[in-house]
Image (cartoon, rainbow, N blue to C red):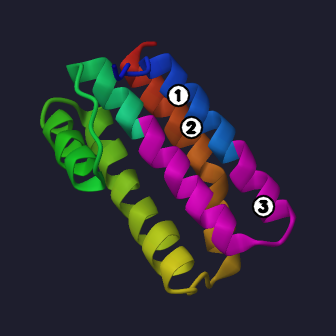
């Protein structure tokens, strides 16, 4: 029997993964830090969707589609949608997969800003 974790559990996981991203950043591994920050943003988005729709989604395509749907009803959700897409592109695709993490100060800023995304998603979820 599979049990769906609660939004609060998933938000806690997102914060823990982001803490790992910051540790990797401090250790000088920017690519791993970027991927962990992306993972934290994605997890926070999954938690928001679970809290808002009671849907536990498994793919990034599903998560991004449902976030777009949430964005149609809320300016705050639209802001998250834009930030989600930018995080996926810059941290996940460009930096982690392609090794293009330049300029480093911009990548580091995006890694650190993932914490604010998690907070904003959690506030919207009201958990």
Quadrant for the N terminus, please: top left
Between the residue at mark 2 and the residue at mark 1, the CA separation in whole angstroms equals 5 Å
Q: Are marks 3 and 1 in contact (CB under 8 Å)?
A: no
Quarter assignment of residue 75: top left
* CA neighbours of label 3 inside 10 A, class few (<14), some (14 to 19), many (20+): some
Quarter assignment of residue 110: bottom right
Q: Residue 89 placed where, x, y %?
A: 40, 70
Helix, strand or loop for disc 2: helix
The label shown at residue 71 is none
Q: Residue 93 placed where, x, y %?
A: 43, 75
Q: Is residue 26 magenta?
A: yes
Q: Residue at x 13, y 39 (%)?
A: 69
Count of marks placed on residues:
3
Residue range (magenta):
19-44
**Residue carrying label 3:** 24
The residue at the far top in this view is 127
Between the residue at mark 3 and the residue at mark 1, the CA separation in whole angstroms equals 20 Å
Q: Earlier in the sequence, mark 3 or mark 1?
A: 1
Residue 114 placement, left or right of 127: right
Q: Residue 27 placed where, x, y %?
A: 87, 66
Residue 95 placement, left or right of 82: right
Helix, strand or loop for disc 3: helix
Q: Earlier in the sequence, mark 2 or mark 3?
A: 2
**Residue carrying label 1:** 11
Vertical comparison of 29 with 68: above or below: below
Q: Residue at x 21, y 30 (%)?
A: 74
The residue at the far front in this view is 1
What is the magenta segment's predominant secondary structure?
helix
**Residue carrying label 2:** 14
Helix, strand or loop for disc 1: helix
């Amino acid at each position: 029997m599979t049990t769906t974790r609660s939004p609060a559990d998933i938000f806690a996981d997102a914060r823990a993964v982001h803490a790992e991203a910051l540790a990797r950043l401090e250790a000088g591994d920017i690519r791993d830090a970027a991927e962990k920050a992306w993972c934290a943003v994605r997890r926070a988005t999954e938690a928001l969707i679970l809290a808002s729709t009671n849907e536990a989604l498994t793919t990034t395509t599903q998560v991004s589609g449902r976030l777009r749907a949430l964005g149609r009803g809320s300016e705050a959700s639209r802001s998250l949608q834009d930030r989600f897409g930018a995080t996926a592109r810059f941290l996940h695709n460009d930096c982690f997969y392609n090794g293009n993490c330049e300029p480093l100060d911009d990548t580091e800023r995006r890694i650190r800003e993932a914490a604010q995304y998690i907070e904003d998603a959690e506030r919207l979820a009201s958990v």
